[in-house]
Image (tube, coloured by chain):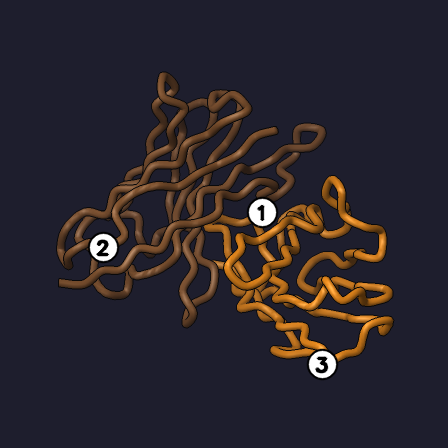
Amino acid sequence: EVVLTQSPGTLSLSPGERATLSCRASQSVYSSYLGWYQQKPGQAPRLLIYGASSRATGIPDRFSGSGSGTDFTLTISRLEPEDFAVYHCHQYGNAPHTFGQGTKLEIK
Amino acid sequence: QVQLQESGPGLVKPSETLSLTCTVSGGSISDNTWSWVRQTPGKGLEWIGYISNSGRSNSNPSLKSRVAISVDTSKNHVSLDLRSVTAADTAVYYCARESFYSGRPAAFDIWGQGTMVTVSS
């Protein structure tokens, strides 16, 4: 199975700053079928990005995704207070689907 | 707007079968592919399996021999059975819809709120 490794484990930033989150796959993700989710405590994950770079419906344009093959990045251009949460990457191009372990984005 | 709601017992005894239902409202259950995902503090998110609109299903090899996923279109339900549970199956269980865009998979766009299941005697 494809193992997804997210880094850093925790990212401490201030509102207004730029956040860069990484997701590295143990083998190439088929057709860049890579998604990013945001999860807040007690809530289900919320889809932000699919296909590595396409924003899901209703997602603000400060969220962007990039990458292909084995290296993917989620960028939040200017952090808003509501962006502090845990972020997960998910590959759905290779069976079985797998998720990264998550990156916690916390307020500095 | 499609909404998902998981339901089932919050406590299951070891060696028994964990049975959960996902009720789909606001849309057709027949037009979509549905997955089950679970989450534990230690292992994070883990995909359990899916069932497609054609009735095809598949599951994670780590769980495959214990998992059954089915759809009841008359009730708009997606069901999960996980047999021979142990404490390691204690988790929050989610159902999720796999979306498609221009015929290509587009990740899980709609999730239920999740239901906590504890395996304990």
Check the image and name the residue furthest to the top. Answer: B74
Q: Residues within 10 Å of mark 3 (few under 14, many from 20)?
A: few
Chain with brown colouring: B
Q: Quadrant of the C terminus of chain B?
A: bottom left
Locate residue A61 relative to residue B103 in the image: left or right. right
Residue B7: name its quadrant. top left
Q: Which residue is mark 1?
A: A93
Q: Which residue is mark 3?
A: A12
Q: x, y (%) of residue A25? A: 61, 64
Residue at 35% x, 55% y is B116
Q: Which residue is mark 2?
A: B11
Q: CA distance from mark 3 to mark 1?
A: 31 Å
* Depth order, front residue of A48/A66: A48
Instruction: Identify which amino acid the numbered label 1 is placed on.
Output: Gly
Q: CA distance from mark 2 to mark 1?
A: 34 Å
Please, what secondary structure does the residue beneath circle 1 have? loop
Q: Residues within 10 Å of mark 1 (few under 14, many from 20)?
A: some
Query: What is the chain letter for disc 2?
Result: B
Q: x, y (%) of residue A95? A: 48, 48
Please, what secondary structure does the residue beneath circle 2 have? strand
Residue B92: name its quadrant. bottom left
Q: Is residue A78 above or below residue A57?
A: below
Badge 3 vs badge 1, beta-carbon distance below 8 Å = no
Badge 2 vs badge 1, beta-carbon distance below 8 Å = no
Of circles 2 and 1, the one toward us is 2
Residue B73: name its quadrant. top left
Chain with orange colouring: A
Instruction: Identify which amino acid the numbered label 2 is placed on.
Output: Leu
Residue at 53% x, 68% y is A101
Please, what secondary structure does the residue beneath circle 3 have? strand
